[in-house]
């Protein structure tokens, strides 16, 4: 079985060496880049299974890189690293499309745990044949639980692994109020605190993909004091 490949992009050579050595010892194929230019050279040859990306770098910064790469359909998951540890920084990182966010300094073991969680969510089974695939329909949308895809009128809608994971939870727990804490427990991979609002960022990103009017959602409704409620029939 081929090893998962990880690209580590950070302008600090010490961090690049530490992370590359540790992840290699854990069985991953690792390539490193010091900036956006060297990362683009790697991406021109082959896409990784996951990208570890530093926020603060000279030239094009990590946020700009993440936003640019996320515009490419099917781009692999991204874990952002940053010395910026405030909640708002994590939220910004998630809003540009990162699948997870880890503040510096960090323990390599925690980074490994985040990588494994994201790759586990990203992996899933190979696409099943149409006649045997597990499909869930809501409104004009279809979710293939085997292929881990969302489509509308046969056109696939690109989702990050985090967005898909959240959607799968919603469609398999329809018409039930789901608390933010419970959703965070199901998603895993995030460092939580009592004021963590990253689940709201994911919900807002998902709403933009499936709601005609994200400010007045028909499918993913906010339940004041409870969390969120997924209503597959939408609004009548």
Image (tube, rainbow, N blue to C red):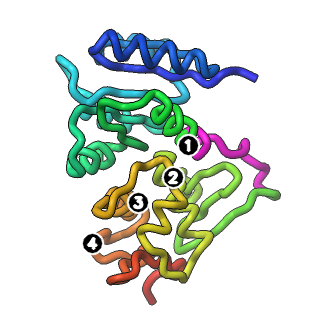
- The residue carrying pointer 2 sits among few (fewer than 14), some (14 to 19) or many (20 or more) residues within 10 Å by Cα, namely some
Q: Position of residue 163 (x, y in %)?
A: 46, 54
Task: Identify the residue position indicated by label 3 in the image.
Answer: 206
**How many angstroms separate mark 3 from mark 2 (CA)?**
17 Å
Quarter of the image that includes the N terminus: top right
Camera-side residue of 230 and 121: 121
Label 1 close to label 2 by CB (< 8 Å): yes
Foreground tag (3 vs 2): 2
Q: Position of residue 106 (x, y in %)?
A: 36, 31
* 148 sits left or right of 45 in the view: right
Q: Give SS at disc 1.
A: helix
Q: Which residue is at 65% across, 67% downward?
A: 136
Label 2 close to label 4 by CB (< 8 Å): no
**How many angstroms separate mark 1 from mark 2 (CA)?**
7 Å
- Residue 175 placement: quadrant: bottom right
Task: Identify the residue position indicated by label 1 in the image.
Answer: 117
Label 1 close to label 3 by CB (< 8 Å): no
Task: Identify the residue position indicated by label 4 in the image.
Answer: 215
- Residue 83 placement: quadrant: top left
1 or 3: tag closer to the N-terminus: 1
Foreground tag (2 vs 4): 2
Camera-side residue of 84 and 92: 84
**How many angstroms separate mark 1 from mark 3 (CA)?**
20 Å
Task: Identify the residue position indicated by label 2 in the image.
Answer: 188
Say if residue 14 shows up in the picture. Answer: yes
3 or 2: tag closer to the N-terminus: 2
Q: Which residue is at 38% across, 55% downward?
A: 192
Magenta residues (range): 119-130
Q: Farthest residue to the bottom: give it.
A: 236
1 or 2: tag closer to the N-terminus: 1
**How many angstroms separate mark 2 from mark 4 (CA)?**
27 Å
Q: Which residue is at 31% across, 30% downward?
A: 105
């Amino acid at each position: 079985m081929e090893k998962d490949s990880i690209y580590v992009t950070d302008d600090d050579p010490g961090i690049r060496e530490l992370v590359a050595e540790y992840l290699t010892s854990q069985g991953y194929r690792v390539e490193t880049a010091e900036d956006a230019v060297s990362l683009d050279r790697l991406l021109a040859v082959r896409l990784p299974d996951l990208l570890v990306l530093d926020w603060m770098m000279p030239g094009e910064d990590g946020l700009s890189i993440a936003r640019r790469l996320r515009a490419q359909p099917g781009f692999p998951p991204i874990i952002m690293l940053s010395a910026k540890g405030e909640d708002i920084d994590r939220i910004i990182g998630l809003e540009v499309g990162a699948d997870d966010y880890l503040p510096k300094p960090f323990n390599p073991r925690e980074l490994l745990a985040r990588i494994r969680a994201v790759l586990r969510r990203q992996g899933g089974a190979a696409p099943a044949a149409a006649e045997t695939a597990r499909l869930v329909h809501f409104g004009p949308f279809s979710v293939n639980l085997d292929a881990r895809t969302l489509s509308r009128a046969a056109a696939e809608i690109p989702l990050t692994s985090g967005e898909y994971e959240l959607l799968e939870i919603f469609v398999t727990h329809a018409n039930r109020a789901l608390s933010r804490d419970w959703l965070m427990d199901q998603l895993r991979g995030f460092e939580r605190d009592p004021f963590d609002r990253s689940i709201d960022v994911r919900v807002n990103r998902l709403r933009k993909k499936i709601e005609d009017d994200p400010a007045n959602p028909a499918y993913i409704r906010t339940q004041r004091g409870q969390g969120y409620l997924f209503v597959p029939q939408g609004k009548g």
